[in-house]
Image (tube, rainbow, N blue to C red):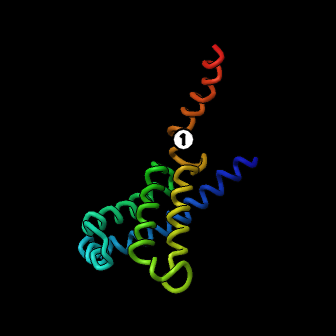
Amino acid sequence: MFARIQDLTALIGRIAVGVVFLAHGLDKWNQGVGATADMLSGVGVPLPTLAAIFLIAVEVIGSILFIVGVALPLVGIGYAIAGLGAVFFVHLDAGLTGEGGYELVLVLALAGLALGFNGGRFSLDHLLFGRKRAAVNAAEPELQHS
């Protein structure tokens, strides 16, 4: 019973974090790569066009994958990179709290990373790969005692 609650809370967390990143990604998508790259260049991000493509891909495609639970570790790492980049290039000078502070960005980035590696069993990753891993892990003690 407790494991199902853990899986449900991981799903709820993935949906919440994914929706927030998706909303930001759709804003960038609507602005376009050029405008997003100009904004990134303005705050000193190196390779702004490449960074804009990365952010749009992670925040739009990655968020959809994150919500349904596909490629969770990869998307979690992408969220961490995107969020920590925003902390250091945009929000750091404003401090942790207050207007423009980095507290929300930091929490979202690291929550995405944590959920990427602990996304629960209510995910396509678990459905596709988790059962195979569980079967292999269950067989390992038998192999060690042989």
Amino acid type shown at disc 1: Leu
The percent position of residue 127, horizontal first and vertical second, equals: 54, 41
Identity of the residue drawn at 45% across and 72% down: 87
Q: Toward the viewer: 104 or 66?
A: 104
Identity of the residue drawn at 60% across and 29% down: 137
Identity of the residue drawn at 61% across and 23% down: 139
The quadrant where residue 107 appears: bottom right
Q: Residue furthest bottom?
A: 99
Q: Toward the viewer: 57 or 80?
A: 80
For residue 69, above or below residue 93:
above
For residue 117, above or below residue 84:
above
> Quadrant of the image for the C terminus?
top right
Identity of the residue drawn at 61% across and 60% down: 12
Residue that mark 1 sits on: 127
Left-right relation of 94 to 5: left
Label 1 sits on a secondary structure element that is helix
Q: Residue furthest right?
A: 1
The percent position of residue 24, horizontal first and vertical second, equals: 42, 72
The percent position of residue 18, horizontal first and vertical second, equals: 50, 63
How busy is the neighbourhood of tag 1: few (under 14 within 10 Å), some, or many (20 plus)?
few
Q: Residue furthest top?
A: 146
Left-right relation of 8 to 123: right
The percent position of residue 39, horizontal first and vertical second, equals: 30, 78
Number of numbered labels in the structure image: 1
The quadrant where residue 78 appears: bottom left
